[in-house]
Amino acid sequence: MQFAYNNKFKPTKNDFQSKLKKNLGKISFIITLVFVFLLIIYKTTLSYSSNSIKSIYPKYHSFYKNDIPTKSSLIFPSVEHAPLLRELTIDKLFNTQLDQAGNKKYLFSDSFDDETTKQKNEEDSSNQMLKVKNSFLNHGKLKFNGPETPEIIIVTGIDFEKYELSHLTKIVQNRVNYSQKKGYGLYINWIQQYTPLLKDTGSSKEWAKLFLLRSAQYAFPNAKYFWYLDEDALIMRYDIDLYKYLLDPKVLDPIMLRNQPIIPPNGVIHTFKNTKAENVQLIITQSSSDLNLNSFIIKNEFISKSLLEFWSDTLFRTYHNFPKNGESALTHILQWHPIYLARTAIIPPRTIAGLHTQMELPEGGDEFHYSEGDFVVSLRDCSIRKSCESEIDLYWSKLEGK
Amino acid sequence: MVYVDKDIESNLKYAPRSRNVFSTVKSTLVKYRKVVILLISLIFLSLFTDVPFVPHLKLSQPNVVIILAANEGGGVLKWKGAQEWSIERSSIANKKDYAKRHGYDLTIKDLTVKKRYSHEWRESWEKVDILKQAMRQYPKAEWFWWLDLHTYIMEPQLSLEEQIFSKLDNLTYRQLTDFNPLQLKTDIPYVDYSQPIDLLITQDCGGFNLGSFIVRRSQWTEALLDIWWDPVFYEQMHMTWEHKEQDALETLYNAQAWIRERVGFLPLRSINAFPPGACSEQSNDPRYFYSDKERDFVVNMAGCDWGRDCWNEMEHYKALSKKLQRPWYKFW
């Protein structure tokens, strides 16, 4: 027993322990070093360094190589040029080129940025027509670079071949009044600005709204919402705040029409039942038989940009079976491509596009038509009725009379 | 005496516990040091190396899925012969081995002619559907590498991470200014090249080549897969679109900025090198053809079933790869 006792207390263990304690610092240092070393190996073999982009690629640009920065959030052209622009005609506004087949091609060109032409233009500044032409072409290059981007931008395309100066003034003034009051941005451009694209495929001017929206997204890269309001429409209430009225997901959620046929009343494809208001990228209304693109809202995110570019693709613009142009194309897209349908909200017409009618409306109005106190009046198809001017005058006088 | 002894015994029994835990652990470690060293080295080999015979612990789920298209155009219209079976076996074994080695997932998709694609408009547009299906099947994976059946990974020791993903920016070109066999537009409005690359494809002498390409899961990819086949586009173009989804992608790339800004082009030889038989009109252009001296990664026997011998080519590259991969210490 005595032997066992001695054996158990052999000093070897204590010896090792003391050695260990002495070298504890050294050992822990070596362990940390090995650990750090392994960590470095692990990190360097797995990290994907894909952030540095080579500068050789062209910068993000529009149809023109250079932008003209502006501090004003209200971008609209000089409406008073309309009669002169009409006199100039499109052929003189753009540089043209004959292609191999002998067709005339209209070009977007930066030639007005060249130093020589700039000087020449200054010398010729007496020439009123050249001034008008320059102002027209330069308007397409405007890009907002003010300190604070407005969240909501109103987008309108105006056509100097369709309306006289007096009506154009009313249309623009209506948007300016509203956006100034609410602190929104404004992007108004001549529809003729997109002549090279439209003529290239022989497309109707109605397609211009898509190009216009894409330009607006470029001119206001940090804005959140773009409200396309056709020239054949007027804002009738300057006191309504669009965000609180419609865009706020809490407001949008209960009014979205779920399980609504894309082609009313009996279309086969319906909107989703479970779309979340926060995910909505496109807000549109319908008439009794089709989509109404007189007034619609699109967000400024990846999906909506891709939608605009896809929607305005040449192959849609040349398709023979799209009688209503952009509207037919959107109807097609929503029925075939769930990625966009899942992000689309159809809302009751009178919220942003109450239609004009000459009929007597029942008390309180009906589902589709503008009645007193509604936000917007849409004069859709007024060209077919041949009464655009008189309708604008009618609603403008109502606005002024208030 | 006995009583005292017992007392000492009990004291001894509890003696080590009264010391701190640290030293107890130390002493056990020292006692079993051989076992401990063996265990540590095993863990080390398992986590940080690829040596065989050791189970390799992968904590994360596979990040890469290889999609192998088999049976293209087969099915009821055509019976497979012995050589076709052999090609398929070699190709599948090659990818299986590669996927296992790097911890990727492999999914083999059957491209037999199906009734649902046999309508004039949709023939052989299964690629898009298969990609969507694979993305649903592997919801955690980020990268999907499509490989046609007639491909062979020549250097299976190279991982996609080190070969492609880690040097994405240096390896790819995003503008077609230098190499543009289709004469597509080199600059269109609204392209933002600061966006990340979500689709990695190669160009051969005839334009885009989708025999071997890599796609990343993203909202962009979801949108592309959704619009890739559109009935209105197809109705107008199906007579000119000989290569179906390949031509459709070229058209989309040429026209739409959002597509263009996330496509990166890899040199053909990086994941899709050709044998001498393909692109034969430009047989002296070294950009296209597999080089064993430079140890190209993957060979794609593109178009071998159009007047060439697929089985021969497959056997040739299989043997070549085996030769190149033979370790220095093996002499037989």
Image (cartoon, rainbow, N blue to C red):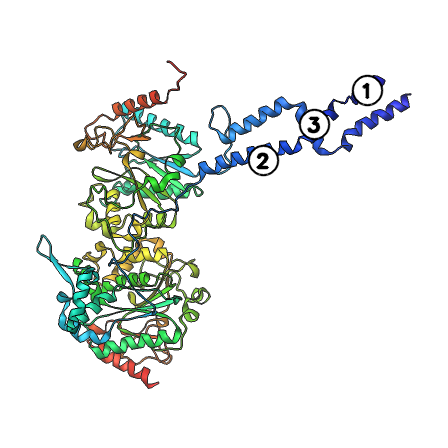
Instruction: Identify the mark nearer the N-term, 2 or 1.
Output: 1
The residue indicated by pointer 1 is: A6
Point out the residue furthest to the bottom here.
Answer: A401
Residue A37 lies, with reference to residue A248, above or below; the image says above
Which is nearer the N-term, disc 2 or disc 3? 3
Q: Amino acid at mark 2?
A: Thr
- The alpha-carbon separation of the residues under discs 2 and 1 comes to 39 Å
As drawn, the label of residue A32 is 2
Horizontal side of B78 relative to B195 (left or right) equals left
Quadrant location, the C terminus of chain A = bottom left
Pointers 2 and 1 within a single chain: yes
- Mark 2 closeness class: few <14, some 14–19, many ≥20 residues within 10 Å: few
Q: Position of residue B236 (x, y in %)?
A: 19, 50
Marks 3, 1 in one chain? yes
The circle on residue A19 is: 3
Kindly identify which chain the residue marked by label 3 belongs to: A
The quarter holding residue A371 reads: bottom left
User: What is the CA distance from the residue labelled 2 to the residue labelled 3?
Assistant: 20 Å
Q: Nearer the viewer, residue A355 or A265?
A: A355
Look at label 1 and name its amino acid: Asn
Residue A104 appearing in the image: no
Q: Secondary structure at mark 2?
A: helix
Q: Quadrant of residue B85?
A: top left
Asked if the residue under mark 3 is in contact with the one under mark 2, i.e. CB atoms within 8 Å, the reply is: no
